Image (spheres, rainbow, N blue to C red):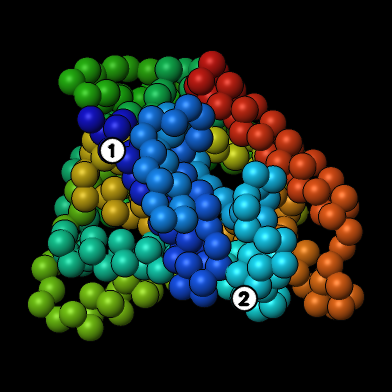
Amino acid sequence: MSFLAAIAVLAVLILVHELGHFIAARSQGIHVNRFSLGFGPVLWKYQGSETEYAVRAFPLGGFVGFPDDDPDSDIPADDPNLLRNRPILDRAIVISAGVIANLIFAYLLLVLQLGIIGIPEGLQYQPGTVVQPASEKSIAYAAGIRDNDIVLAVNNKQIPASPDSLSILREEIQNNPNQEIALQIQRQEQRLNLKLTPEPGKDGKGAIGIRLSPNGKPVYRRSQNISEIFGVAANKFQQIVVGTVGGFGQLITNFGETAGQVAGPVKIVKIGASIAQNDTGNLFFFGALISINLAIINILPLPALDGGQLAFLLIEGLRGKPLPNRIQEGVMQTGLMLLLGLGIFLIVKEALFQ
C-alpha cells in the first residue's frame, strides 16, 4: 500500500503541474486540444467541447497538447487564440504556470501537514543511532550494515537515548582509524554483532562511509493559531527551496562526485514508500519536497523543459522575432532524447542494481 501511495503522490504532482499549464491557457482563451495524465496506452478518455481528456497506463508523466502542434487540427493557422499567435507575455504565463502550480501546491501540502499532524517540537529519543551506508561500495555496507539499522553499542559502549548519541558513535569511529571496532546492531527484531575497520581520511580520522541520524520519534504540538501554521510552513518551504537549489548547484559544480547520487523514478518511489511505511503523515512532506524539485528542474533552461521554452521566448523578445522552427525543433528533439535516455538509464540502473 505504501508503494502505491508514493506512486499516487507523484501522479498528483504531475497532474498539478499540467493543470497549471491548462488553467493558464484556458483562462486566457487559448486553444487546448489535449490534456493527458500519464503516457503510453490510453486507459480512459473523454472528448469535451474542445479538449480531449485522457488517463494513460503509466502515471509518471503527462502533457497538455495545443492544436499548434496538431497537423490534423481544423483551426486556421492565423487564429489569434492559438498559443503561437499570442504575445510573448501570454505564452510565458502558460509555460511557467506548471512551475508556479507546483510551488503553490508544495506550500499547501506543508500547511496541511502542520495543520493535521501538528508542529514538530523535537524528538522523543530512544537508545541507539540510526545508520545508512553512503553507498554499496562503503566499508559499512561491506561489513553488513543496511539502511535503517540501529547501532545500539560501539566497542561495548552503550549508546543512550540522548541528543549526544550521534557524537558518541561518530567519535568512536573517527578515533579508531585502521583499528577494528565492534558494533551491536538492531535490525527490526534481530540483534547482530558486526566488526569493521575504519579507513583514515585526508584528515587522518577514521571513516566507514555512513550517514547517521537520531533514533527517535517526532513529537508534535497541535496549534489552533492558523497564522502560526502558515508562518512555520513558509519557513519550511523556504528551507526546502534553498536546500534544493543548493543541491543542484553542487551537482553542477561537483558533477563527478555527485552524479551517482541522482535519483530516478524507481528510487524516488522507493523513498516515498519507505516514508509512507514509517509515517503516513510524512507523505505530505515527501509530496512538498518532490513538488519543489519538479518545479526547479522544469524551470532550468534546458531543452524540452519549461525553462528551455522560456529561454526561446527570451531570445524571441531580444531578436524581435522567433528563432527558425527548424532550429527550435532540433534543439527540443535533442533535449527530449537526452532526457528520455537519462530517465531510461536511471530506471534500469535502479531496478537492476539497487
Left/right placement of residue 156 relative to residue 322 reads left
Please say if 191 is above or below 44. Answer: above
Q: Residue at left 30%, top 79%?
A: 231
Mark 1 Cα within 10 Å, few/some/many (few <14, many 20+)?
some
Element under disc 2 = helix
Residue denoted by label 1: 5
Q: Quadrant of residue 335?
A: top right
| Residue 113 percent location from the top left of the image | 23, 61
Q: Amino acid at mark 1?
A: Ala
Q: Amino acid at mark 2?
A: Asp
Please say if 210 is above or below 302. Answer: above
Left/right placement of residue 117 relative to residue 319 reads left
Q: CA distance from mark 2 to mark 1?
A: 36 Å
In-front residue for pair 165/337 = 337
Q: Is residue 266 visible?
A: no
Residue denoted by label 2: 90
In-front residue for pair 208/114 = 114
| Residue 253 percent location from the top left of the image | 75, 54
